[in-house]
Image: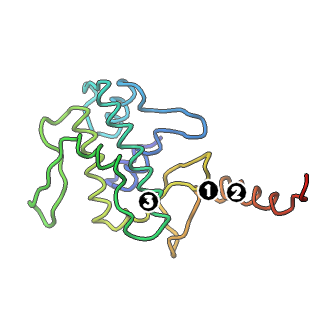
């Protein structure tokens, strides 16, 4: 996958992070310390030499799934808030609010170059995405076997699936078959 952080788009970084778990296949790109360290280094969030531990993997998984839940809530009414799991994951990261610059920002604490610092940078992307206006447009596919994160760029913000061609088609085909099913079959 291309470096989602290269252009500085926090929404792309967040979707890339959530998509480290392919729900359909069960493949998890950050399930091991080496996998997490590699993912962070590949996005410029930690140096290649940064080590990750089992605790970092647990925090990363909690952060990822909390983000997935928050993005899923973006399909519903405004103001759904952060899920408790996401709040807990954020509390475990070395972050602080700074008032330096044109707007308040969430920034990682020292020491830089650690896996925890890299995960804090992922968490800080939430605030950057909110400031850019993309946070409420971050969603997850409503197809239960997929749950892939995506940026809803539709004009009316009503996109439900990562891909109409694949997941939208699956959902609509199932609904059609359910309507056509003869009672008693």
Residue density around tag 2, few if under 14, some if 14–19, many if 20 or more, within 10 Å: some
Residue at the location (44% across, 43% down)?
2
Which is nearer the N-term, disc 1 or disc 2? Answer: 1
Secondary structure type for disc 1: loop
Q: Position of residue 109 (x, y in %)?
A: 13, 42
User: In the rendered view, does 99 fall on the left or right side of 178?
Assistant: left
> Residue 45 appears at what percent x and percent y?
27, 39
Residue at disc 3, secondary structure: strand
Residue shown at 57% from the left, 62% from the top = 160
Q: Which residue is mark 1?
A: 163
Which of the numbered marks, if any, corresponds to residue 171? 2
Nearer-the-camera pick, 76 or 19: 76
- Label 1: few (<14), some or many (≥20) within 10 Å? some
Q: Earlier in the sequence, mark 3 or mark 1?
A: 3
Q: Which residue is mark 3?
A: 138
Q: Residue furthest bottom?
A: 156
């Amino acid at each position: 996958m291309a470096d989602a952080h290269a252009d500085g788009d926090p929404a792309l970084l967040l979707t890339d992070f959530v998509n480290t778990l392919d729900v359909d296949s069960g493949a998890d790109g950050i399930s091991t310390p080496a996998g997490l360290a590699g993912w962070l280094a590949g996005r410029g969030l930690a140096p290649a030499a940064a080590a990750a531990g089992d605790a970092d993997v647990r925090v990363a998984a909690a952060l990822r799934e909390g983000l997935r839940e928050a993005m899923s809530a973006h399909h519903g009414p405004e103001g759904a808030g952060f899920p408790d799991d996401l709040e807990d994951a954020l509390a475990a990261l070395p972050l602080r609010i700074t008032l330096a610059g044109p707007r308040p920002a969430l920034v990682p604490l020292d020491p830089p170059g650690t896996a925890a610092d890299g995960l804090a940078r992922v968490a800080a992307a939430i605030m950057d995405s909110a400031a850019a206006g993309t946070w409420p447009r971050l969603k997850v596919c409503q197809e239960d076997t997929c749950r892939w994160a995506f940026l809803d760029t539709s004009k009316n913000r009503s996109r439900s699936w990562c891909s109409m061609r694949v997941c939208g088609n699956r959902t609509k085909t199932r609904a059609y078959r359910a309507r056509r099913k003869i009672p008693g079959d």
